Image (cartoon, rainbow, N blue to C red):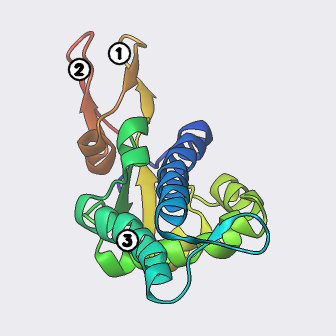
């Protein structure tokens, strides 16, 4: 990775996750009520081939969007991006590996595993990131050593490990 390690930014990461899964859940509920059949429990269900659409939307949304753009809508809105450990764009297969881990990292433990691994790894990675050799950047800040201004860094500055202070113009490397 760069000389500037990413910061945990847990609030941003939690918000991005809530946004992303909120989008998926909203679509899934709409889809089940729109195309499902009433069941014995008073709700609706989708069976057979139409149920495949629900899985397909997860696959299309998370691994493909994240693999092509490095960001889901939640990441974009929260100013986060997934990159490889060398700071390059991730592949679809890396995005898929990250998302397969969601089933136990987020759902079976309500995010506790993800929270603990982000807090206790050098690059603030969750298990899916460790497996995929990726990390999440965005929201990093640095203090100018010349004028002590607190600066918000861009993705590129975080990856390069250097930045120019907007206040005094000093170029700095970490």
The CA span between labels 2 and 3 is 39 Å
Q: Earlier in the sequence, mark 1 or mark 3?
A: 3
Coordinates of residue 37 in the picture (x, y in percent): 58, 73
Coordinates of residue 17 in the picture (x, y in percent): 55, 51
Report helix, strand or loop for mark 2. loop
Q: Can residue 11 be seen by looking at this rendering?
A: yes
Residue 21 drawn above or below residue 48: above
Asked whether the residues under the numbered discs 1 and 2 touch, taking CB atoms below 8 Å apart as contact, a structural biologist would say yes
Res 170 label: 2
Q: Residue at x 50, y 55 (%)?
A: 30
Res 63 label: 3
**Among the 4 quarters of the image, the one containing residue 107:** bottom right
Report helix, strand or loop for mark 1. loop
Q: Residue at x 51, y 69 (%)?
A: 129
Residue closer to the observer: 68 or 31: 31
Q: Which residue is mark 1?
A: 146
Q: Earlier in the sequence, mark 1 or mark 2?
A: 1
Q: Residue at x 34, y 63 (%)?
A: 66
Q: Residue at x 43, y 35 (%)?
A: 139
């Amino acid at each position: 990775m760069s000389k500037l390690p990413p910061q945990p930014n847990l609030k941003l990461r939690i918000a991005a996750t809530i946004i992303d899964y909120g989008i998926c859940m909203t679509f899934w509920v709409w889809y089940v009520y729109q195309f499902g059949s009433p069941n014995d429990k008073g709700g609706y269900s989708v069976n057979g081939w139409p149920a495949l659409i629900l899985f397909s939307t997860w696959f299309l949304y998370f691994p493909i969007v994240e693999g092509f753009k490095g960001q889901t809508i939640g990441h974009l809105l929260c100013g986060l991006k997934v990159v490889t450990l060398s700071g390059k764009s991730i592949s679809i297969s890396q995005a898929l590996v990250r998302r397969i881990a969601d089933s136990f990292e987020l759902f079976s433990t309500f995010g506790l595993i993800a929270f603990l691994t982000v807090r206790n790894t050098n690059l603030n990675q969750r298990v899916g990131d460790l497996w995929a050799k990726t990390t999440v950047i965005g929201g990093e800040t640095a203090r100018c050593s010349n004028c002590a201004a607190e600066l918000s860094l861009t993705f590129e500055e975080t990856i390069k490990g250097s930045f120019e202070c907007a206040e005094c113009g000093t170029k700095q490397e970490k």
